[in-house]
């Protein structure tokens, strides 16, 4: 039966339009007596029981003597060597398409003087003759279709599952339902850049997804590294690996080899801390020339939030009576922070706004602002760039410089009357770091902890 399958899987490549009255019903799949559309709702025991049975394609053809539809021999094609639902269904659907095309072409088990196998062999020979006359087609670069081997051997069995194009669609659609809008936008952008590279390299997107291998992904990541940075290369690796993990989770591929590709060391670029004089001059300038940006900076630095988290704040997220705010954070559903008195004094009257109004808009405090969160964050980043240009500050300074500066100031003030451990324990509650180790690493990176003058030790 496996030899028949090897022919049938190619049959549906070319369909001939013949006008004839159908003498058969559409081939159907027998899948162990269960509805495979609800496969993942079945228990493991029911799935195992279904897979223990033979799956096959069945159909009926009209007997010319009785003029009644008669059930024909079931076609298994060796597909039951597969022990999982996905590959069995994939193989059976190829069988079904091939059989349907043969029937459309006019195959009649009652009239042809050939056995089913002989009919297939004859058809393939005729097809080869036609192809030999047309050798002028332009060749694509790399990918050969993975052969369909349906034999019970100890060798690994490879099967055409879904095409590269369909695999990418599956991955993107799945991630669209999981990731936040901003995260999905970045994910889709990186995956699309990978697709563009594959197209330039001559990959055929109709070929099996299994033709993309570890070497191919490494070659792409090397181009990302050469054109950008180790960090971008690592981010591309993460998102491509995430896409392939979706394929593993959906039984499309067996292994996520992208996760086995090494991560390069990427030194993060941190904003530089302001000097006390710089901090005073910059804040005074912003307060005078851009009050909205000034309050934005205060929320960002006094509450130790991320800029995008400040952009998410709505009027209803602030509880001024209890001096708390509630914001959707990167690593948790809702993060609760206290609002220090120094910030409450800067707030205007918020009672005139609706609770679902955003706290920050381009021109005023409180109101509507319908755009992506990333656009809002970029808006204030570019707005602060004008301040940097005024003071001729380099790329090493930015919004995060305010946070680094204020945390350094907090540490030094608290260290005057407490031990280093006590200071870090209090800072942990203020900054929102997940662990003490993460806080200590951050403090070292921004040089918040410096030794006292040791000149006397050198005399």
Image: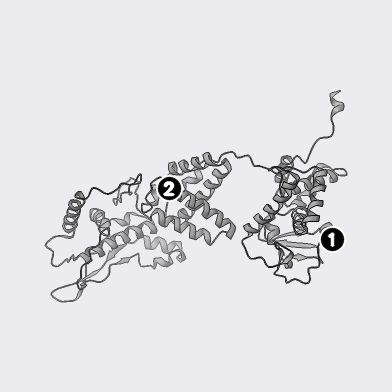
Residue 234: image location, x then y, percent: 55, 44
Few, some or many residues within 10 Å of mark 1 (<14, 14–19, 20+): few
In front of the other: 376 or 309? 376
Relative to 118, say whether 348 is above or below.
below
Return the mark for residue 198: 2
The answer to whether any part of residue 422 appears in the image is: no
Residue 165 lies, with reference to residue 107, above or below; the image says: above
Crowd around label 2: few <14 · some 14–19 · many ≥20 (10 Å): some
Q: Position of residue 3 (x, y in %)?
A: 23, 53
Q: Secondary structure at mark 1?
A: loop
Q: Residue 413: which numbered mark, if any? A: none
Q: Residue 150: horizontal and vertical position, in percent?
A: 29, 52
Front residue (pair 277, 119) = 277
Residue 345's label in the rendered image is: 1
Where in the figure is residue 118, as x and y percent of width and height? 16, 57
Q: Relative to residue 247, is residue 25 drawn left or right?
A: left
Residue at screen point 79% across, 71% down: 351
Residue at screen point 81% across, 58% down: 343
Q: Tell me which numbered mark, 1 or 2, is placed earlier along the sequence.
A: 2
Secondary structure category for the residue under label 2:
helix
Query: In this orientation, which residue lies closer to the viewer: 353 or 42?
Result: 353
Occupied quadrant, residue 94: bottom left
Marks 1/2: CA distance? 56 Å
Pointer 1 and pointer 2: residues touching (CB < 8 Å)? Answer: no
Residue drawn at 49 percent across, 60 percent down: 173
Looking at the rendering, in which quadrant would you find the N terminus? bottom left
Query: Does the rendering let one see residue 217?
Result: yes
Does residue 406 appear left or right of residue 308 in this picture?
Answer: right
**Is 101 situated above or below 161?**
below
Q: Residue furthest bottom?
A: 67
Q: Quadrant of the C terminus?
A: top right
């Amino acid at each position: 039966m496996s030899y028949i399958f090897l022919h049938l899987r190619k049959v549906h490549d070319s369909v001939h339009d013949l006008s004839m009255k159908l003498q058969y019903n559409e081939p159907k799949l027998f899948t162990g007596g269960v509805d495979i559309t609800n496969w993942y709702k079945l228990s493991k025991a029911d799935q195992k029981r279904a897979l223990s049975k033979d799956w096959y394609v069945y159909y009926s053809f009209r007997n010319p003597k009785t003029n009644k539809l008669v059930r024909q021999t079931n076609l298994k094609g060796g597909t039951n060597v597969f022990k999982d639902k996905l590959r069995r269904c994939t193989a059976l659907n190829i069988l079904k398409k091939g059989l349907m095309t043969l029937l459309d072409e006019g195959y009649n088990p009652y009239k042809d003087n050939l056995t089913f196998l002989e009919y297939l062999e004859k058809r393939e020979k005729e097809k080869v003759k036609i192809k030999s006359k047309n050798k002028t087609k332009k060749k694509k670069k790399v990918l050969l279709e993975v052969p369909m081997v349906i034999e019970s051997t100890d060798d690994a069995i490879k099967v055409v599952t879904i095409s590269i194009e369909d695999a990418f669609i599956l991955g993107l659609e799945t991630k669209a339902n999981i990731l936040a809008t901003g995260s999905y936008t970045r994910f889709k952008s990186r995956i699309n850049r990978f697709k563009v590279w594959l197209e330039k390299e001559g990959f055929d997107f109709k070929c099996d997804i299994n033709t993309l291998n570890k070497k191919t992904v490494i070659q792409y990541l090397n181009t990302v590294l050469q054109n950008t940075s180790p960090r971008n290369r690592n981010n591309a690796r993460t998102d491509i690996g995430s896409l392939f993990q979706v394929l593993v989770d959906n039984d499309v591929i067996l292994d996520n080899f992208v996760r086995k590709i090494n991560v390069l060391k990427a030194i993060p670029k941190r904003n530089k801390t302001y000097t006390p004089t710089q901090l005073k001059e910059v804040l005074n300038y912003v307060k005078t020339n851009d009050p909205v940006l000034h309050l934005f900076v205060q929320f960002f630095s006094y509450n130790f939030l991320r800029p995008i988290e400040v952009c998410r704040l709505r009027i209803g997220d602030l509880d001024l009576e209890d001096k708390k705010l509630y914001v959707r954070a990167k690593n948790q559903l809702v993060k609760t922070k206290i609002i220090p008195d120094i910030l409450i004094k800067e707030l205007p009257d918020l009672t005139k706004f609706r609770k679902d109004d955003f706290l920050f808009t381009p021109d005023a405090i409180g109101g509507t602002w319908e755009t992506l969160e990333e656009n809002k964050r970029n808006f204030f980043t570019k707005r602060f760039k004008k301040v940097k240009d005024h003071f001729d500050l380099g790329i090493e300074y930015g919004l995060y410089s305010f946070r680094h500066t204020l945390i350094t100031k907090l540490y030094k003030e608290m260290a005057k009357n407490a031990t280093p451990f006590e200071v870090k324990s209090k800072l942990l509650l203020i900054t929102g770091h997940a662990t003490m180790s993460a806080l200590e690493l951050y403090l070292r990176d921004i040089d918040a902890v410096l030794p006292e003058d040791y000149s006397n030790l050198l005399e």
